[in-house]
Image (cartoon, rainbow, N blue to C red):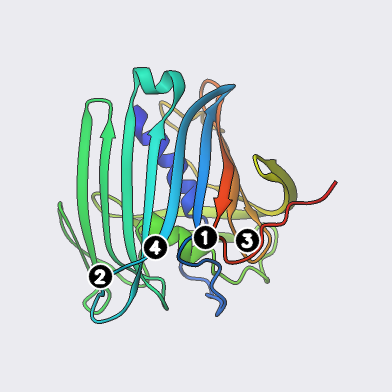
Amino acid sequence: MKKYYLLLFCLNCCFSAFSQEVTKTDKTAFQAGEQITYKLKYGFFNAAEATIRVENSPVKFNGNPALHIIADAKTAGTFDVFFKVRNRYESYIDQQTLLPYYYTEDRHESKYRHTDKVTFDHKTNIITADKGKFPFEGNVFDFLSAYYFARNIDVSNLKVGDKLELRYFLEDGIHSLGITFLGREKVKCGLGTFNCLKFNPTIIPGRIFRKNSKLYLWITDDNNRIPVKAHVELIVGSLVMDLSEAKGLKYPLNPIKK
């Protein structure tokens, strides 16, 4: 597995934690103007930073207004010297259904370059990308739209051990990610300590991950449903993604008072 896949994997898992098969609530957890920033650390070293923001789109799709989601990811510190990453991901989603209309990515990872343009046609159930056309059934997302759809899922009936499945399109096809609900915990991040929902997305062992490597993800147990921390074990060391800034939120972000 190349290094850039490791960074993308951690960002993807933080951005998309639930299955599209569960029930969406009527209450929207976010609004245009929201901006969230994460820091990725390898041991004591700052490895990367990712910022996600939501804007009202001037472009309409099939006459419907859309929200424009933009995510920028870049390496930091020593990692920026030896393996420079400058990635941008964009998704246009329906304001009501939160399903994606259009997705783009522009990845610059050391000497590697990759771009993609993806159109989701939910009437014909065809995804059109740079590598061809891909039929699908049910709701399929890009990882950005999956993240925002996930924040609006009804989790009130989740029980410890419940398993969910995420389906998303990335680069060359539709992929699935299994996720297990582990319960509720208090978790500390860069913005304080929060009551959180804890999940365990499945990972595949390889050159980066051990056979028994675990990935854990914590999401605020409030109306915002924001991922505040992720931790993944590697063959050598571990990576931690931590919420460092959140502004323009629809609901107050209330850390636990000491």
Q: Are marks 1 and 2 in contact (CB under 8 Å)?
A: no
Residue on which disc 1 sits? 18
The numbered mark, 3 or 4, whose residue comes first in the sequence reads 4
Q: Do the residues labelled 1 and 3 touch (CB within 8 Å)?
A: no
Asked which secondary structure carries label 4, the reply is strand
Q: Which amino acid does label 4 sit on?
A: Glu
Residue on which disc 2 sits? 59
Q: Which amino acid does label 3 sit on?
A: Asp
Callout 2 environment at 10 Å: few (<14), some (14 to 19), or many (20+)?
few
Measuring 40% from the left and 56% from the top, which residue is drawn there?
144
Q: Which amino acid does label 1 sit on?
A: Phe
Asked which secondary structure carries label 3, the reply is loop
Callout 1 environment at 10 Å: few (<14), some (14 to 19), or many (20+)?
many
Comparing 184 with 35, the one in front is: 35
Number of the label disc, if any, that sits on residue 55:
4
Residue 217, how many percent across, how many down? 59, 47
Asked which secondary structure carries label 2, the reply is loop
Q: In this view, does 92 lie above or below 228?
A: below
Judge depth for marks 1 and 3 and give the one in front. 1
The numbered mark, 1 or 2, whose residue comes first in the sequence reads 1
Name the quadrant of the N terminus: top left
| Alpha carbons under labels 4 and 2: distance apart | 11 Å
Number of the label disc, if any, that sits on residue 162:
3
